[in-house]
Image: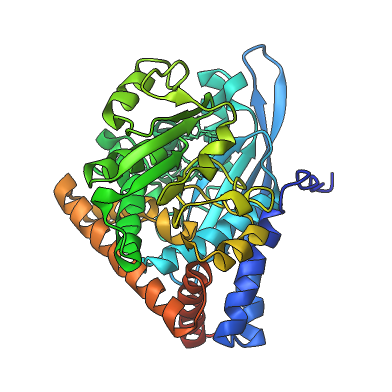
Amino acid sequence: MAYIEPAPIKDKENPLESMMERFNIAAEKLGLSDEVYNVLKNPAKQVIVSLPITMDDGKIRVFEGIRVIHSNILGPAKGGIRFAPDVHLDEVRALAAWMTWKCAVVDIPYGGGKGGVRCNPREMSKGEIERLMRAYTLAMIDVFGPDKDIPAPDMGTGPREMAWLMDEYSKAHGMTVNAVVTGKPLVLGGSLGRTEATGRGVMVTALSAMQKLKINPFQATCAVQGFGNVGSWAAQLLEERGLKVVAISDISGAYHNDNGINILEAISYRDSNNGTLEGYKGAEKLSDPMELLELDVDVLVPAAVEDVITIKNVDKIKAKLIVEGANGPTSAKADAIINEKGIMAVPDILANAGGVTVSYFEWVQNRLGYKWTAERVNRRSDRIMKDAFDNVYQASVKYNVPMRIAAYIVAIDKVAKTYTFRGGF
Ligand code: NAD
């Protein structure tokens, strides 16, 4: 049967178009040649597979699996695997390209990839998920590889799924190949510092931006949307560096306290409350959770889902600085208004690249057969994030463009130059 692309969700920007809009502006500023433009515009490889899985009731269900390698010009492709009901090719293509730019911005030797399986892991048993992960790995056995394409967790997958992937890949090769995947449990070669790495990168880039904007962290306020891995780590690390976090939120709602929220207390509440802030008493619950984005704070960290800052609410945003912990939280249309308002936005491909940086360290450690201390991991990733911020900032001054376009310029320039040296056919 022919592949039928589902229509983009109504009122949401098509993720591929939204990425391409920014890519086009940066390409024009850079004066990218048409030849290289066409190479970078198109994904290098797109694989779609059907995965028949025996469910617990004995029936066979067929799932669709996708893997897209956008580019392997800088090195093996790198990118997560998403298990979600609405996974579609356009989204995976956009996310794969995002990974190319993200790895190039932080100057790590990877191309970009992304994968997904259209399924609802919340409605599946552990055994069903394991069989699906193993089937997906086997179907992609010629795509994956420590020198070709290195997957990682994404929405709906985690260390457990990465362990199954590593095991299945290793069995097929007759040896343990732990460098084929990152985000593994520590005992299988995962890296210390990986859990907090993305939130840590958000903190490092936020502080670098605050320095440029002359905002004193000890007098600054902050609101964080999303209190999962990225949001809660970012909130904790920013609080440790002096910021007053006045609002946090998760799927249960948004919680606001002008006197500041005790983040460690909120984390321990969440952890003892089935992973949610529902019923949190350390702050007042806002009637509309989206109000969090409109609070009068210095720093706003969207760290939940995509498309939350849109043409509908961008006018009401009061923060001086937005640091994008989530992927794609700002729509392309809202970007223009953010710039007009003079708000600095540290874009996702820079702000949340701490995660892929430490994933790269995991791969390096696996290949060395050696383990680094958390202190070494943090020191090196902080340096990479700080340097990346400075490079992007310099590009934004040089080309007189906002930070988002500057990040694309830095990334596209690097990939284009490498491609020009390597050459095509
Ligand atoms: P997570 O599942 O750990 O946390 C997501 C949080 O967002 C949860 O607290 C959830 O309740 C909350 N949430 C969901 N919908 C919401 C809504 N509408 N309003 C407010 N809160 C909502 O996920 P995560 O790993 O923290 O990832 C968050 C974002 O960061 C995603 O966009 C992800 O792609 C991106 N990201 C994550 C990493 C990483 O290393 N984890 C790396 C790069 C980018």
State the image quarter where residue 107 is shown.
Answer: bottom left
Q: Residue placed farthest to the top in the image?
A: 57
> Is residue 60 placed above or below 12 in the rendered structure?
above
Question: Could you tell me residue 387's position as x and y percent?
Answer: 29, 69
- Relative horizontal placement of residue 25, taking residue 74 as reference (left or right): right
User: In the image shown, does 314 or 386 lie closer to the viewer?
Assistant: 314
Which picture quadrant has residue 261?
Answer: top left
Q: Nearer the viewer, residue 390 or 213?
A: 213
Place of residue 115 in the rendered image (x, y in percent of width and height, measured from the top left): 57, 47
Could you say which is closer to the camera, residue 213 or residue 370? 213
- Asked whether, in this view, residue 62 is left or right of residue 67, the answer is right
377 shown above or below 108: above
Asked if residue 212 can be seen in this view, the reply is yes
Does the image show residue 366? no
Q: Is residue 325 left or right of residue 133?
A: left
The quadrant of the rendering that contains the N terminus is top right
Q: Is residue 369 left or right of residue 100?
A: left
| Identity of the residue drawn at 31% across and 41% down | 244
Which residue is rendered at x = 29% and y = 29% of the image?
Answer: 262
Disc count in the image? 0
Position in image of residue 306 (x %, y %): 59, 46
Q: Which colour assignment does the render follow?
A: rainbow
